[in-house]
Amino acid sequence: MKKKSVKIYLAIILGIVFIISFWGIKFLHNDYFTNDYYRSNEQVVGIFDGSNLSNSLPAKPIICYTAVFKNTAIWSSRSNVETALANDDVLITVETWLKGVDYKNNVLTEVLNGRFDKQIHELAILAAKSRHQVFIRWNPDMEVPANVFPWQFKSPKDYIISFNYFSKKIKMIAPKAQIIWGPSGYPGDTEYWPGNKTVDYVSITLGSTSENTTNFYPKDSTVSYMLKHKLHRLRFINKPVLIIDNDTQKTPFKYSWLSEQKNYFNKYRHTAYSPNNYVDSADTKPVRSSLKIGVFDPNKKLLNQPEIGVEHLFTDWGEVERGDFEKKFSEVINRRHEVIVTMEPWRDISGKPDTAVLESILNGRYDKQIKKLFSIISATKNIVYLRWMHEMEIPIHRYNWQSQDPVTYINAFRYFMQFDGGPGKNIRKVWGPAGDRGSADFWPGSDVVDYISIAIYGLPDKNITDQDKQEAFSTIFNRKYFRMRFLDKPLFITEFGVKGSESFQNKWLTDAAETINANPHIFGVCYFNLYDNPKAWGDIKAPDWSITPQSMLKFCSLLKKYPH
């Protein structure tokens, strides 16, 4: 009985070992390479090269694999990949994952700490041995605000540093490997651009799993529109784009779409897609010799302070037609102040909003009003900062020029700024996004912009009522300024404000002054000394950003003085 019992126990133990081994091998295999993962439908269907449209064509067959790096991964089954590398061009998508409690850590930081160096080294050796083209894409879909991958919802700077670390390690061993930067093509993708030196190709994904899990932005109605918008977002990136289709079974890719995009790029080659739009470094921004300080202050509580030299006016077509704007403008000029004019083209004298305002502008409907506006603001020697159709990138419908096609917006912006030769020499043309995701999608071109304007308000969400939960000026500025790094114009912060007690406002403004002093590419700042439009806040009380004259004086005293 004892021998029999021992045999039974041994059989059980061996059975358990076999089961563990079976599942362990399967698990480890999935830790390394797989082509039946959730990327199993991925297929490279085309190449688009905006800088050389003749190179845009259907892609030749490329086998797609996924390499999943985990901190305990063992490189086990490599035969399939080695066979593919010996016979075909291969695209390997690398994913870095952590296990257990490590999942709470920043996987991008762990990459820099060398946690995946062994796997990177072995992948590079495989790529170096291949006689065919090897494409390596690292941690894609990084810009999508989803929780599908552990490298999402991370700092763009962290991602960029980690990407460059990975790319350089691969290139040291496999210099012929083509490194792919692989955003999905979602709004905000260029925030994560690692730069020309470490990227050979870019990829976008049609039918992205990550995008299907989020609804921050409206989804495109057709795949062809999706392709159009994703390629547009990459117009600053001077690299060929691999088009990856993850939905080939549901909506087969049509190669006629590539021809449509080539024609579209050619049509706007000298405007939206001009090579002059591309700047690969933020270091080109000019540095101020003086700082303009202004206010939007309709109740005239701060206007007479000695440091104030600029006033902000908001207007629309109706005010221009009725003469209301000219009256307000003349009052500012008589105070010998410079003027920020934010032109909101949403109501004419009828008072009815134009729901197709961009098309109306391009069709000449408002030519008369534009001409009158230009004549008023150009009839003075005072500098006028003309801001036109601001905050266009926010995916809402507060203004009728928001949530519109970027190229249509660009064309309408250019039409206005170049109308009848443009406004007078005293006018400074201001392009004014809020500074949110996808701002650069609406960049109209250096030839029609003198200043970039962004808005900085402490309130990050309209449902937040606790003043202490407001973001610091520096936090907001750093995030928004980073989105402007492709654009070579100085900044004018034409709106900023904070709500709360006077002591909290003073603390927030102190941080603002320190940030402005540390960033000499900020040429001007303008405080919004009023409450916001109540209609925009619904049942929630609109925030009041008004400050006391004492707070404004203190803020101005903290700013570095520059010779005028």
Image: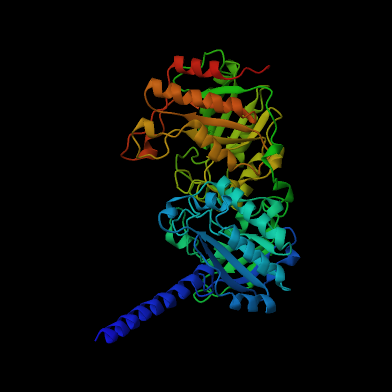
* Residue 300 x/y as whole percent: 47, 18
Give the answer, above or below, for where 5 lies relative to 168. Answer: below
Q: Nearer the viewer, residue 4 or 485?
A: 4
Give the answer, above or below, for where 301 lies relative to 184. Answer: above
* Residue 496 x/y as whole percent: 50, 30
Left or right: 369 in relation to 239? left
| Residue 364 seen anywhere in this rendered image of the structure | no
Q: What residue is at 58 percent from the left and 45 percent from the top? A: 157
Q: Nearer the viewer, residue 458 or 200?
A: 200
Instruction: Name the residue furthest front.
Output: 2
* Residue 153 x/y as whole percent: 48, 50
Quarter occupied by residue 283: top right
Left or right: 15 in relation to 116? left
Give the answer, above or below, for where 427 lies relative to 164. Answer: above
Q: What residue is at 39 percent from the left and 77 percent from the top? A: 17
Q: Nearer the viewer, residue 503 or 125?
A: 125
Give the answer, above or below, for where 161 lies relative to 546. Answer: below
Instruction: Name the residue furthest left.
Output: 1
* Residue 227 x/y as whole percent: 58, 63
| Residue 19 seen anywhere in this rendered image of the structure | yes
Quarter placement of the C terminus: top right
State how the image is colored. Answer: rainbow
The mark tally for this picture is: 0
Quarter placement of the N terminus: bottom left
